[in-house]
Amino acid sequence: MRITGYRTLTTIQEWARPVGDANGVLADGVTVLPVVLVDTDEGITGVGLGSHVEVAGVFAAIEGEDPRSVTALYDRMLRYAFKAGHAGAVFATVGALDTALWDIKAQAADEPLWRFLGGRDRVVPAYASGLDIGLGDDELVAAYGLYAERGLRAAKLKGGMDVEQDRHRLSLVREVLAEAGGGARPSLMLDANETWSRKQAVRHVRELERTVDLTWIEEPVRRWDAEGMAAVHNGVNAAVASGENLTGLEQFRPLLRAGGLDIVQTAAVGGITHFLRVAALAHAHDLPVSPIGNIPVGLLHAATSVPNHLVSELQDLRPPVGIAADLDIEDGAFILGDAPGLGLTVFEESIAELGLRPRPVKPEGPGVRPERAGLRLFATTQPTTETDRSPTRRERADTEAPPSDRRVPATEH
């Protein structure tokens, strides 16, 4: 069997509500999902969900190769892309192609990937994750009510901007899940998406913990800040989770050496081989691993084969436009099917009708880090409109004083 070519598509996830985190909100609730299809000379096509930035250069590493040599080809792709580093969209392209190769290999064996990788149980525990920072109280309750109907009793909320708002929103979701679970205490997590400084993170979480039992706090400080993660780990009761934005194993090692992580995360965009290696590294440190991503299908299959999988993220309950997956969500878990490979079906015509191409990250969306992130003394909600806030001292000076007399106090330089 030989790899003969690839095709790229771009589809969308329609959330039907605002989605976002501390870094921004997409009001239209539409997120973009790139898709890579890898073809072979035996008519088997593998599906990879993820980036296809610079795909031509990365694909050169695997063209004409036997796709069943997937782990060796993963390292070959990294060698071809090493100048770009183990980071960003190029690393995600390697991950998408890697996932497609695993899909091909399992299809060739006529087995679902979870069984092909050595998994025994098709059931993968899940937690709800609504990208919900832009939702009002009623919308929040309604969103997590849908998760609760599927049996989920664990939820991760987005937050980090205002401690009392976080407390209120966590309490609302706790009530929804507890009621659905017959009064059983649910697990609650909070994701700050790297928006805090070290001290701010400890103060915020410790204040929350006066009334809320947090299972974990996610990405409290910058992803690479090993000492900062350790400071948060030592300063709060909640477990510290991070790793979704780390890539090569060399980026995980400093955090593990510093004792900064309790939950080791890895994102779907990193690919299956990357996940398996991170899981082994975490297992060597007696730590659990938890996959992240809206459509982590490849990692769900891989999670069945590792001894330290904890729980996987479930975001939207619906698949992206033009994609069907052989899996169900029941009793708080993903239930993987028996279709060979990943069990994904891509309806290319439906996606093509969207007419989408890769596009820059929206500046108002969660992909753009705020200018003052990590530089606030207190985690307070920022005004959303000009009419919602009082003018700053500088603005008052600009509007009240004649142009020639405008001065900025020395403390504001």
Image (cartoon, rainbow, N blue to C red):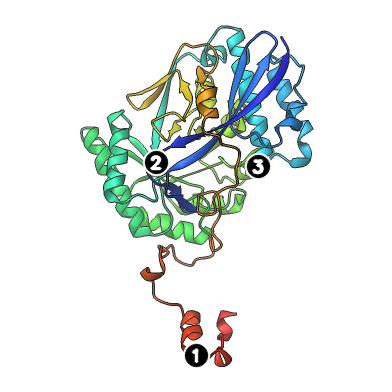
Q: Amino acid at mark 2?
A: Gly
Residue beneath label 2, please? 130
Query: Which quadrant: the N terminus?
Result: top right
Residues under labels 3 and 2: Cα distance?
A: 24 Å
Name which residue lies at 65% across and 42% down: 88
Q: Is residue 218 above or below residue 343?
A: below
Q: Is residue 122 above or below residue 90?
A: above
Query: Which quadrant: the C terminus?
Result: bottom right
Circles 3 and 2: CB atoms closer than 8 Å: no
Say the numbered circle drawn on residue 88. 3
Return the residue nearer the eye: 147 or 316. Answer: 316
| Label 2 secondary element | loop
Circles 1 and 3: CB atoms closer than 8 Å: no
Residues under labels 1 and 3: Cα distance?
A: 47 Å
Question: In terms of sequence position, does the residue under pointer 1 or pointer 3 come before the other?
Answer: 3
Between label 1 and label 3, give the one nearer the viewer: 1
Q: Amino acid at mark 1?
A: Ala
Return the residue nearer the eye: 295 or 360. Answer: 360
87 with respect to 309 (left or right):
right
Residue beneath label 1, please? 401
Q: Residues within 10 Å of mark 2 (few under 14, many from 20)?
A: many
| Label 3 secondary element | helix
